[in-house]
Image (spheres, rainbow, N blue to C red):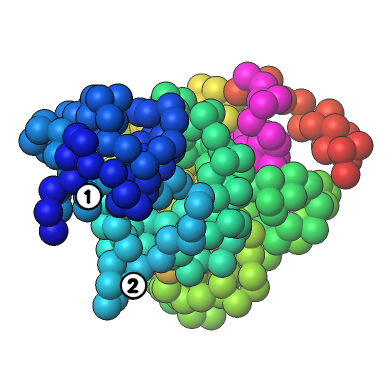
Amino acid sequence: MRSIRRGDNGPAVVEIRSILVGLELLETASDVFDDDMDSAVRAFQQSRGIGVDGLVGPETWGTLDAARWRLGTRTLFHSVTDALVGEDVRELQERMLEMGYDAGRADSIYGPRTARSVAQFQREVGLTPDGSCGPQTMKALRRLGRKVVGGRPQWLRESEAFRQAGTNLMGKTIVIDPGHGGGDDLGVVVPDGPLRWTETDLVFDLAARLEGRLAAAGMRVHLTRGPQPASSMTGAERAELANSLGADLLISLHLDGHDNEAAHGVATYHYGTGSGLSSTVGERLANLVQREIVVRTGMRDCHVHSKTWDLLRLTKMPAVRVDLGYLTSPVDRDRLVNPLFREQIVEAILAAVQRMYYPVEIDVPTGSIDVRQLRVALANKA
Ligand SMILES: [Zn+2]
């Protein structure tokens, strides 16, 4: 292909001009490669990091051809035989990266990694995760709009996903998973005179209290086990149970233990690999649970962490595990054995669940929600 240059005219010039006009580098369409077009080509070459010579040879033509695609003008998908290339792909990749999805390098090529990141985004906003970017996906992206830039993108994404699911928690299904239980699996055990405190009993008590409160708020609640299960369950089995129930959320309750009795505090876990890939909705739930508990109970904040545990990895719904203090810590234990304190924890978790279904725009300071008022507000919205 001969380079097209200043002084040329014809259909190729018309086409190149129209791309440059689309890119707002040139004002008028025509069939003449004039001085204005020469400047526009040079500006384009400079912006794309290719040799600035004003000539439209194969490289410049290829880059111009890719640039004609503005995000949203065609459906993007991963084609194994002939990869889609374009500025629109690059723009999409940049959006994905900006929002925390692992789209790889923004190389303008719609490869499998880009498709995977799009599928992940689709899943979280409640679309069919087919990994292609068509009108529905564009609509979801546009709705997130500029809010995503510079904010807490994952939080905004989650609010989007939950907006699609509906902001009312009435009728939502939640699985509460009291840890351990069955066989000799008592979790952390601490002797106390002739008695002993066990993680398995205390978390079941918490789960049962939570069950009542959540059910009163209109949710469908399932526990993964009873107070004295016949056999123990693995994390994978608990995840499978929650999946089979089609649960909207899962909260697993544990207590922690440590040889050093000075260790104390509360920590919450959500699914994540620690390298950027994480369940963003799970992370939001984890943050809410952690914040509400810390603020309402004053327990030491051992923060939110990502883990790849079976229970978190295999569940299809946002799932978190919260370790509600150290049974081996005299400070935490004194509080945990007090039913009134456990009631406070339940109240905190309930508030966190309510907040999951509360639009971000009208978020209120942590610890300030009167759960009864919130329930009224939500009921009125429905
Ligand atoms: Zn445990």
Q: Residues within 10 Å of mark 1 (few under 14, many from 20)?
A: some
Q: Which residues are magenta?
A: 344-365
Please name the amino acid that badge 2 sits on: Ser
**For residue 192, side relative to residue 248 (left or right):** left
Figure quadrant of the N terminus: bottom left
Q: Secondary structure beneath disc 2?
A: loop
Q: Position of residue 63 (x, y in %)?
A: 23, 47
Nearer to the camera, 139 or 246? 139
Q: Position of residue 246 (x, y in %)?
A: 64, 70
Q: Position of residue 80 (x, y in %)?
A: 29, 76
The label shown at residue 79 is 2
Nearer to the camera, 115 or 340? 115
**For residue 168, side relative to residue 308 (left or right):** right
Q: Residue furthest right?
A: 380
Nearer to the camera, 251 or 210? 251
Residue 87 position (above or below residue 21): below
